[in-house]
Amino acid sequence: MVSQAIDLLKKELPVEEGRLLLNGDGAKTTGLVLVDLVNGFCTVGAGNLAPKVADKQISEMVEESARIARLFCEKKWPVLAFLDTHHPDIPEHPYPPHCIQGTDEANLVPALQWLENDPSATLRRKDCIDGFLGSIDKHDGSNVFVDWVRNNDIKRLLVVGICTDICVLDFVSSALSARNRGFLSPLEDVVVYSRACATYDLPLHIANTLQDTIAHPQELMHHIGLYIAQGRGAKVVSEFYRIAFSGLNLPEFSARQSISSGRTEKQAPTRSPSELFKRMFLIPCVKDTSKLRVLSEVQEKEKKRIYHVLSGA
Ligand SMILES: [Zn+2]
């Protein structure tokens, strides 16, 4: 699909992407949900539903998800990982066989395998698209996800993974409905972090050469997944920060210029002390390592000066 057409559709279906800032006590009640970061969906050549060649959106999603998972586990904040896993004799229509139990397809990607031994992580194998339904125990009806929210007193979910418009969207939609029905107390917010989500790419010209296959243009479907999640009541963020040290209560959510809406004007540089503080002392969870390095370099040099500005000294 030509980029102009995608840009036009994004304007018609705008996604307002904000920033999420974790700081203070609120951070402790945020739970991270990793959706299907398994080889069968993420690792090149790993199976029928894995990317055939290196895929930028998917590799960035894996990298960013792994970075956030590390951050959560270092803080001992709760992490729940869904792993798509199927019995070899039970197909999942309309998809070809994938993530068969006992194969490497159904295992976490290499960048996240350490999660298997991390005490902050709960791993849940699921045999359906929707992680909420996949969390139900077939014998006693209990729900691993619901119990995880309650036991960890989670007020906010941060959801990442693949596919934005399939497993991520269905899980987010079910979680929001369950919250609205009072099944997920004390959960308040469901946040989708767009840069740590991805979907697969199947352009029309390739889909036309395959039997019983419909096209799935990656960039557009990723956007539509975010758009529908937003419409169901999720918050969408394209930037995510945690605060480097405690002591200040900054607003957790802030609306931001929506890249996806097609508006291109840039925010004017802010000079206020609080903004300066944010620029200096937040740990940006972004892929841009040069930005991270620059931040850490200026941090020590400027720390004292900015602190004086903030304290009025
Ligand atoms: Zn599946």
Image: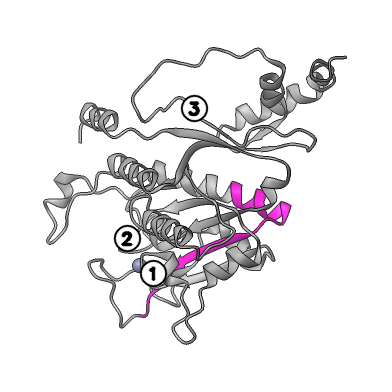
Q: Which residue is mark 3?
A: 256
Is any atom of residue 259 visible in this view? yes
**Quarter where residue 291 is shown:** top right
Mark seen at residue 49: 2
**Disc nearer the start of the sequence (2/1):** 2
- Amino acid carrying label 2: it is Leu
Q: Residue drawn at (80%, 35%), measured in percent from left and top?
A: 247
Q: Which residue is mark 1?
A: 99
Give the Cα distance between marks 2 and 1. 9 Å
Mark 3 vs mark 2, foreground winner is 3
**Quarter where residue 120 is shown:** bottom right
Residue 127 picture location, percent across and down: 39, 73
For residue 107, above or below residue 165: below
Residue 259: within the magenta? no
- Amino acid carrying label 3: it is Arg
For residue 152, above or below residue 66: below
